[in-house]
Amino acid sequence: MQRFVCIGLLLLSLTTNAWAIQCYSCESIYNKNCGADFDLDDDFKWDCSRVAPPRYLESDLDVRNATACMKREYKVKDLLRIERSCFFGDVNDTVSGCQLDPTLEEAEPLSCHVCDNEDFCNHSNQLKAWPQYLAVVGFVLTAKLLYWLR
């Protein structure tokens, strides 16, 4: 019986990762609550499965679905802009996915943080994977507990 519970928990943890990631999507230039003092507003929440990649990235992408969340900071004429959005591309090679729209004149990229560890992970500079680590530790402890109880 415990073996079935462990297998079921493992399958459940794998299926939750199969659904599309959800991210905050906003730009500080249009909404002050999207800036450095980020307000976790429900209006900023997007299901990335319903978002198409930006046109300037489409030719560089093999996969057309969002793979992660992104928080990008850049300057235009000494004005800091913060953008939170769905990320398209390889999370291990963020160069192409983090590039700025070429139509933005005088844009200077400052930083780009990409995360795929949980929904809405693009809320701050410190994108951490603590929930995943805790899930793994919890799974191992549950498996050991079930082993000892049998």
Image (tube, rainbow, N blue to C red):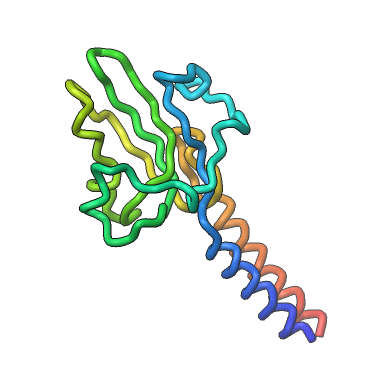
Taking depth in this image into account, of 147 and 89 the one nearest to the observer is 89
Q: Give the vertical position of 64 relative to 112 (above or below).
A: below
Q: Is residue 41 left or right of residue 87?
A: right
Image x and y of residue 70, in percent: 40, 41
Q: Which residue is drawn at 43% across and 39% down?
A: 85
Q: Which residue is drawn at 43% across and 34% down?
A: 84
Image x and y of residue 71, in percent: 40, 36
Taking depth in this image into account, of 2 and 8 the one nearest to the observer is 8
Q: In this view, does 124 lie to the left or right of 45?
A: left
Q: In which quarter of the image is the N terminus?
A: bottom right
Residue found at the far top of this picture: 78
Image x and y of residue 77, in percent: 23, 13
Q: Quadrant of residue 44?
A: top right
Q: Quadrant of the C terminus?
A: bottom right
Give the total number of marks visible in the rendering: 0
Taking depth in this image into account, of 46 and 140 the one nearest to the observer is 46
Q: Which residue is drawn at 43% across and 44% down?
A: 86
Q: Give the vertical position of 126 relative to 134 (above or below).
A: above
Q: Quadrant of residue 76?
A: top left
Image x and y of residue 14, in percent: 57, 69
Q: Which residue is drawn at 24% across and 42% down?
A: 56
Q: Give the vertical position of 79 relative to 90 (above or below).
A: above
Residue found at the far right of this picture: 149
Q: Give the vertical position of 36 relative to 113 (above or below).
A: above
